[in-house]
């Protein structure tokens, strides 16, 4: 028996699928910028709906922390050494 999905997750799965489709069409049609931009927007919005707001904040915090660490490491190696 499959677990039930909430409405947000169902909409997120649909938006993510449409995003992948539009990205694929954008690549097939010689990198059409409109299709790539629309596919990117749909993919990201679908992913956000699937993850949920509480887990998204947790995920974005780790990205922010990783970027700060990487920037600091670059600054140290490039300017100090």
Image (tube, grey):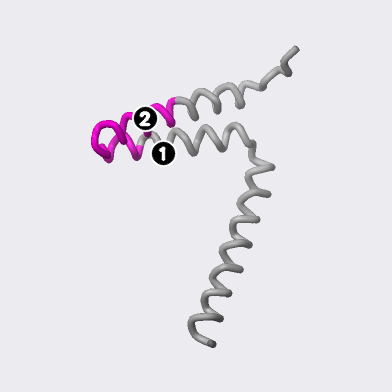
Residue that numbered label 2 is attached to:
22
Question: Is residue 29 highlighted in magenta?
Answer: yes
Q: Quadrant of residue 40?
A: top left
- Dot 1 or dot 2, earlier in sequence: 2
Residue 27 belongs to magenta span: yes
Task: Return the residue at label 1.
Answer: 40
Is 56 left, or right, of 80 in this rendering? right
Residue at (56% x, 81% y) in the render: 76
Location of residue 22 by image quarter? top left
For the N terminus, the quadrant is: top right
**x, y percent for residue 9:** 61, 26
The span shown in magenta is 18-37
- Local crowd size for mark 2, using a 10 Å CA cut-off: few (<14), some (14–19), many (≥20): many
Q: Along the line of sight, which residue is nearer the eye, 57 or 62? A: 62
Residue toward you, 41 or 80: 80
User: In the figure, is residue 5 to the left or right of 75?
Assistant: right
Most distant residue in the right direction:
1
Q: Judging from the image, what secondary structure is the residue with disc 2 in?
A: helix
> Residue 48 falls in which quadrant of the image?
top right
Disc 1 to disc 2, how far (Cα)? 8 Å
């Amino acid at each position: 028996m499959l677990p039930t999905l909430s409405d947000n997750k169902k909409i997120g799965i649909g938006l993510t699928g449409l995003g992948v489709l539009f990205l694929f069409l954008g690549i097939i049609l010689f990198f059409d910028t409109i299709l790539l931009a629309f596919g990117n927007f749909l993919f990201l919005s679908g992913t956000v709906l699937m993850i949920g707001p509480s887990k998204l904040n947790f995920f974005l915090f780790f990205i922010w922390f990783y970027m700060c660490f990487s920037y600091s490491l670059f600054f140290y190696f490039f300017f100090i050494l």
